[in-house]
Image (cartoon, rainbow, N blue to C red):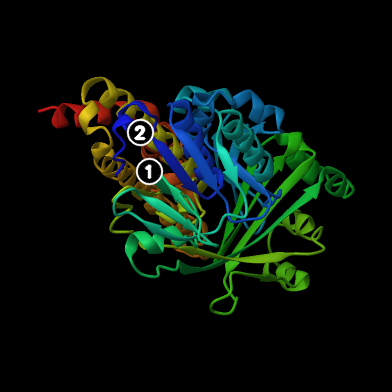
Amino acid sequence: MTTDPDANQQPFKVVVVGAGLGGLAAAISCLRGGCEVTILEQAPAISPIGAGIQIPPNAARVIQHFGLEQKIRDAGAIQVNANHLKRYKDGKILCSRLGGEKWIRDFNGPWYVIHRADYHGVMLDEAVRLGAQLRLNAKVVDITSSGTPQVVLEGGEVVPADVIVGADGLWSATRDIVLGQPSPPVPTGDLAYRGTFSRAQLEAFQDPSIDELIKSGCTYNWIGPDRHSVFYPLKNSTVFNLVLIRPDDLPEGSRTAAGDVDDMRMTYEGWDPVLTKIISCHTTVLKWKLCHHEELRTWVKDNIVLIGDASHPSLPYQAQGAAMAVEDGLVLGLLLARLQSTTTERLPDKRTSYINSILLLFESLRKKRTTTNVKGAIANRYMFHMHDSPEQEARDRELAEADWEKPSRWIWADIGYQRKMLGFDSVADTNRAFEVWLEEEGK
């Protein structure tokens, strides 16, 4: 802990390990609350990587809280008009969630789709604008927590902090330090092909069904035996994103590999001709092994805390992975900011001694929330990948009857579950929890 007698008048020093979306959200939230932030990123440069990403209403409200919604839109984000589930063989729509203004009414926020690099660029620019010190080529090799917490970089440099945030993703080194043992993620049995296509490529088919897809401003999920695919627009509908999920055939220990385009196309043979036409645009492809992690016993050790995929990676079947990470970052920053201002005014002699307690409060809040997401993603995987069968026929009938008013056993179409997931107010929930914590600590 900090022992400087003037520390009670100084802002908390927060070191964020990892400059992904969760780490940047934590940096922005902490900076808005008056903390000092250093971001340590092991990559030598920030490169535009990835493909499409979805920003559901709960994550859109984080962006709104940061005052970044217009910048996201200016970066090419598209407000989604609807989500559609489609039958894999013929493309028949099984169920739709109408979006646009209806999402704002039902879930208090819009649903956006955007290229990951554009989203990341807006967040990075904001963190730097607010005063974050971004350090590239800064690989963390150790963290010590006795006395003043310190990050040790490759080369021996030591970076002190009041709080260390492990936001270093699925293959987190910080997680190993918190748990005290290696903790590699576990393969899910699935892999993903990801790619983007230009509007011109798709319009060249001169197919009215494809033209309808690219003009709709909607997301589409084809669901079928052991597989599903997701298609939606990016960059103001000048580019389109396609993700194909299928059984994993990568060797043990590998994360990515060059894919065989013909093999990929054969994997979806017999699917909707519209989808297979789109797939045929692929000329090169990479395969990603999809991994997750068993629920961690703890996310906190002394003044070190894990967030995002470092603590709760889940199956990507609910468009909530990045959303959970940015919620984590928002909540962590809100709690640290409130602790900083409250203890400076009311409990200055115990200011830094409360940090671990507030990190444990963060953990308790976020575990409940992210467990809901993890279980929901598992449930969607089961529903999406169902083989043709009487159960699948019953599923399709029940989805067709969904009216977004009565409950459904399929959470994708269950209004109660969706309100809990998409309508969640991170700011209000955090502030309520802090007031309860403060009342207990003040006794």
**Residue 336 bears which disc, if any?**
2
Q: Which residue is mark 1?
A: 163
Residue nearest the viewer, comparing 194 with 382: 194
**Quadrant assignment for the N terminus:** top left
**Vertically, is 298 above or below 331?**
below
Residue nearest the viewer, comparing 274 with 197: 197
Left or right: where 89 falls relative to 171: right
Left or right: where 19 falls relative to 231: left
**Vertically, is 345 above or below 179?**
above
**Residue 330 bears which disc, if any?**
none
Mark 2 belongs to which amino acid? Leu
Q: Where is residue 258 drawn, in percent x and y?
A: 72, 71
Query: Dots 2 and 1: beta carbons under 8 Å?
Result: yes
Q: Where is residue 15 drawn, in percent x and y?
A: 46, 44
Q: CA distance from mark 2 to mark 1?
A: 9 Å
| Secondary structure state at the residue bearing disc 2 | helix
Left or right: where 173 falls relative to 120: left
Residue under the point 42% across and 57% down = 378
| Secondary structure state at the residue bearing disc 1 | strand
